[in-house]
Amino acid sequence: MLAGLAAILKRDVRLALRQSADNGMAVGFFVLTVILFPLGVGPEPAVLARIAPGILWVTALLASMLSLERLFAADYEDGSLDLMALAPLPLPLLVLTKCLAHWLLTGLPMVVLAPLLGVLLSLDPAGYGTLVLAMALGTPVLALVGAIGAALTLGARRGGVLLSLLVLPLYIPVLIFGVAAIDAAIYGTGARPHLLLLGGALLAALALCPLASAAALRQALE
Amino acid sequence: MTASRLGRPTMSQRRSGSSLHRFANPSRFLRLGRRLAPWFAVLATAFIGAGLYVGLFVAPPDYQQGESVRIMYVHVPAAWMALFVYTCIAASSVVSLVWRHPLADLIAKASAPVGAGFTAIALVSGSLWGQPMWGTWWVWDARLTSVLILFFLYLGHIALMNAFDDPTRGARAAAILAVVGFINIPIIKFSVDWWHTLHQPASVFRLGGPTIDISMLVPLFLMALGFTFYYLLLLMLRVRSEIVARKIRTAQLLQSAP
């Protein structure tokens, strides 16, 4: 079973690297949109430092949502999703594997790039460690929760707009605790409770989201 | 949706004629709804009328809030209904996902716009009350934010329901979304206990009994009962019109077939 899941992981990563437009675009969107903010609100370092955690998280949310549409859509259209569902693998684990591949290709680059973009936004030095930690805990939640929306909107009319309406409200807790953790680290009030809540959200999402996505995929493939 | 699922009871449904299953058959539900709807209309009008009268003229003004406390007699029941209707949608979604019952889908579909309406009323009336009391139309505290998320969940549910060419697919997808979104309901209920919010903590449904005087509880519960019957009335009417619409659609399809 593990071999099968590893094969799917390898296939997804290889496909994405060979035609890197989709995932590359999400990361490019992340960088470009963050760069727009200093131009939009003015290059004042104090202002930028104040809103830097919010900018980074909101942009990460949007970038992650943007790439979700392709999570199952390509496999759904060419029929490989049917074959995967017929394979002797539990569908929730398959969803989990696809989410892992998706996170490696979009979430992980964002975790790596976030501190660099933090420098551009003159983020307070005390916030960098927490920024990376919070992003590392939060972006997998975005992928897991987003997978439910991606599975639900398979074959829907205007799937992209619909996906944002479904997924963004569910992303809000991650945004709140992610930003609160970085702010707490900067103002020295202790980021630990916020990071623990993010970690708890990640564990809950790991356990529950693949089940919901698998149910959604099953009804899409019926 | 085929004609047989909505038309006469099938063999299995006829055999399991016990308790709740009897009302789960759409045509029996139609008959029941036709009989009950006038009663719901009368009860909703009576309770809302009595609640508005007691709330606006009989109940005393609050010692701190003055006359603007009367906004609460609309705001609080509407907020309760927002949670109650979503809970109904989630429950019928579970029934629809587990037993594949067509009536559960219809109830979820009929309830969603009503729940969204109650949520909008709660948000707007709360905002109108907040301006004189808190000095602001809106604050980003946990209760207000989580109710706003509930409103967007309702909108997403409605949009997803209508996003597919096949209504059964839309219903199934919306049911999964409703169950996933149910996580928000306990968050709304307990947000005032878990976080220090500007929104006041629970004062009616709490351990140790309500902290509100009986003269204010009476109009609150009258309005809540009135809103509940109003919801049931709309539910009956909307489910009935949906069943009729699907019957018409099936008839048209059968007619256009060669």
Image: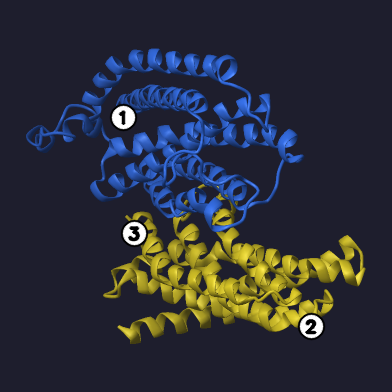
Badge 1 marks a residue whose secondary structure is loop
- Amino acid at pointer 3: Arg
Which quadrant would residue A91 be assigned to in this image? Answer: bottom left
> Is residue B1 shown to the viewer in this render?
no
x then y, percent, for residue A179: 68, 68
Which quadrant would residue B106 be assigned to in this image? Answer: top left
> Could you tell me which residue is drawn at 60 percent across and 62 percent down?
A65
- Amino acid at pointer 2: Pro
**Mark number displayed over residue A218:** 3
Q: Which chain is blue?
A: B
Count the marks: how many?
Answer: 3
Around disc 2, counting alpha carbons within 10 Å, would you say few (fewer than 14), some (14 to 19), or many (20 or more)?
Answer: few
> Is residue A59 shown to the viewer in this render?
yes
Who is closer to the viewer here, B127 or A209? Answer: B127
Q: In the figure, is residue A124 to the left or right of B37?
A: right
**Could you tell me how far apart the alpha carbons at marks 2 and 3 are, in whole angstroms?**
47 Å
Around disc 3, counting alpha carbons within 10 Å, would you say few (fewer than 14), some (14 to 19), or many (20 or more)?
Answer: some
From the viewer's perspective, is residue B42 above or below residue A71? above
Q: Colour of chain A?
A: yellow
From the viewer's perspective, is residue A214 above or below residue A15? above
From the viewer's perspective, is residue A29 above or below residue B94? below
Who is closer to the viewer here, B134 or B14? Answer: B134
Badge 3 marks a residue whose secondary structure is helix
**Mark number displayed over residue A125:** 2
Mark 1 belongs to chain: B
**Could you tell me how far apart the alpha carbons at marks 3 and 1 are, in whole angstroms?**
30 Å
x then y, percent, for residue B134: 72, 40
Quadrant location, the N terminus of chain A: bottom left
